[in-house]
Amino acid sequence: MHFIITDASLARSRAIHLSGTKLVLALVGLSLVMMLLAAGLYHYVFLKGARERWPVVGALVRLVVADEFEQRDRFMRENLDAMARRLGDMQAKMLQLEALRDRVSGLAGINPNDLKVAGSGRGGALVEGHAMSMQELQKTLDDLEKLTGEHQDLLTVMESRLIDQRLKTMMLPTQHPVNGPLGSPFGWRIDPFNGHSALHTGLDFQAVVGTPIQAAAGGVVVAAEVHHEYGNMIEIDHGNNLITRYAHASKLLVKKGDLVRRGQNIALVGTTGRSTGPHLHFEVLVQGVPQDPMKFLNAGRNAAPAAVAALATDVAAPRAVH
């Protein structure tokens, strides 16, 4: 681009050539000057006018400020309404959690009325159609946080109770120790060797030699030996003064001190010791007193929590042979 500048007094002219780059730089410089002038004008007219309360400028500034406050208030109100709706959803879920807590407490054997906490079942402070203030919203959040902590503590207690019940169930001999039909039951019978009446202190399961014998519950092997009457015999301690005995085995698969789990193969059926044929003689002893193993096996077959709990109580305080 060419510019020609003519000086009339000197009768001279001067040509100026601007390339594309120089022209762009000139426009940028001109734009910066205009921006600075505009900023200076704004500072002088609006800020100075607002401070000195010029009539027209003051009214304009008040309109601008009022519009900004209105937009900010509308933004905050929309966010408060959104948070209030989310709080309503949280409170609905909290009520569902309370119902679930009552059902789980029943499974844990805990009276739900004993687990009621402050604020339970109130539903919260939200009212449909009521615009909440920031203070009301914060108070509701604090109440929910407190209620959530209380429910967490209660659920932790119930979880511990359920785990304890599960462990007790796993330590009760409720699984059949061998796959075979029942022969002689627990109780008084005629002894097959001397023909006299005698107490049969266990159950006899008929099975062929070599049939696996399984642990009726988890525990620790306290005896794996040859007995003059029981033959190859295993005793497992399940805790709480409860021991199971497996007799007349042909082969022992565990040794004293082994930790066994429910259903683990511990021996093979045989006819060793005082035996008239291949079978498993299975006993349950509580504090050294023989108990009828069938009540344990029936509890395992029914899988009823109440029956297992009653059985655990009975194990904790046996009174007589039954």
Image (cartoon, rainbow, N blue to C red):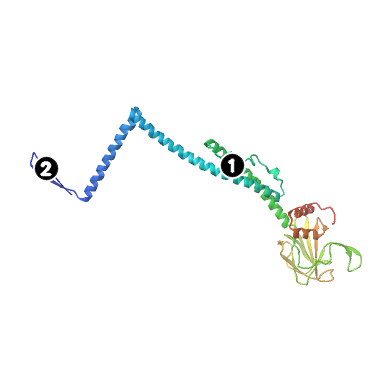
Residue 241 position within the rendered picture, expressed as x and y whole percent measured from the top left: 78, 55
- Name the residue beneath numbered marker 2: 6
Residue at horizontal 54 percent and vertical 41 percent from the top: 84
Q: Which mark is residue 144?
A: 1
Secondary structure at badge 2 equals strand
Q: Is residue 152 in sight in this rendering?
A: no
- Asked which quadrant contains residue 263, the reply is bottom right
How many numbered callouts? 2
Q: Amino acid at mark 1?
A: Leu
Residue at horizontal 73 percent and vertical 56 percent from the top: 169
Q: Is residue 90 in sight in this rendering?
A: yes
Q: Nearer the viewer, residue 251 or 40?
A: 40
123, above or below 231, in the image? above
Residue 307 position within the rendered picture, expressed as x and y whole percent measured from the top left: 76, 54
Q: Amino acid at mark 2?
A: Thr
Label 2 neighbour load within 10 Å: few <14, some 14-19, many 20+: few
Residue 83 position within the rendered picture, expressed as x and y whole percent measured from the top left: 52, 42
Secondary structure at badge 1 equals helix
Q: In the shown orientation, is residue 150 left or right of residue 234?
A: left
Q: Nearer the viewer, residue 133 or 27?
A: 133
Q: Nearer the viewer, residue 214 or 240?
A: 214
Residue 294 position within the rendered picture, expressed as x and y whole percent measured from the top left: 80, 60
57, above or below 303, in the image? above
Label 1 neighbour load within 10 Å: few <14, some 14-19, many 20+: many
Farthest-out residue, front: 129
Quadrant containing the C terminus is: bottom right
Residue at horizontal 27 percent and vertical 42 percent from the top: 32
Q: Earlier in the sequence, mark 2 or mark 1?
A: 2
Q: In the shown orientation, is residue 22 left or right of residue 271?
A: left
